[in-house]
Amino acid sequence: MDEWVREKAHRAQASRSASVWVCEDGKGNVCGVFAFDHRRVVPADVTGSAAGGLTEIPALLLARFALRVDLRGAGVGEALMTEVFIAARESLAYVPARVLILDAKNARLAKWYEEKLDFVPTKTDPLKLYMPMKKLLATLDVVGL
C-alpha cells in the first residue's frame, strides 16, 4: 500500500486515470486507500437483475483498496469499505453505474468480500466480485448513512 500511495496514487489522480481517496487516522498517518475507475461489464458476468436488460453494464470499478497491515483484522477494513460505499453513492450523481465491481488479489480476500460485505463473484471469475448499486444503496440505508 505504501509504495502505491507514494509512487502511483498522485500520478493516477493527476492523469485522471483514477479517483484516489486516502484515509488518515486523525494524526496524519495513512490508514488505507481506495481508488475508483469506470468499466463496462457484460451481462454474462452478473445476474439478470444486475444487468437490467443491457448489453453492456456501466460499472464503478474499485480499482484499489488497501489497508495498513497493522490495522487488519480489527474491523477497520469494513469501516473503510463503508467510506467506499458512501463515495460510490456520491459518484452516482455524476456518472451512472449499475454495479460496484472489484478484483480480489487472492481467494482469501475474495472470501472476505463475500462473507463480510456480501459481494457476489462474477460468473466467469471467482476473484472478480460485484455488488449491484441497488444493494449498496440499501446497505447504506440500513446503517443510516
Image: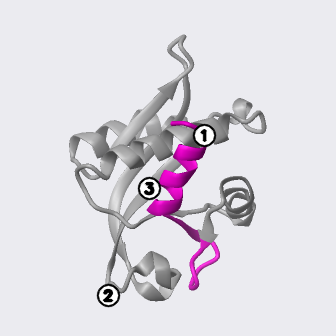
Nearer the observer, 62 or 135: 135
Residue at 45% in and 61% down: 133
Quarter occupied by the N terminus = top right
- Magenta extent: 121-145
- Rendering coords of residue 125 (x, y %): 59, 80
Q: What residue type is disc 2 on?
A: Thr
Query: Of circles 3 and 1, which is in front?
Result: 1
Is the Cβ of the residue at disc 3 closer than 8 Å to that at disc 1? no
Tell me the residue that label 1 is attached to: 143
Identify the element where label 3 is drawn. Answer: strand
**What's the mark number on residue 55?**
2
Seen in the picture, residue 5 relative to 42 is either above or below; the reply is above
Placement of 30 over or under 51, stated as above or below: above
Above-or-below relation of 97 to 11: below
**Label 3: few (<14), some or many (≥20) within 10 Å?**
some
Q: Residues within 10 Å of mark 2 (few under 14, many from 20)?
A: few
Q: Hey, what amino acid is under mark 3?
A: Ala
- Residue extending furthest toward the right: 73
Residue highlighted by disc 3: 63
Residue in the picture at 55% in, 41% down = 82
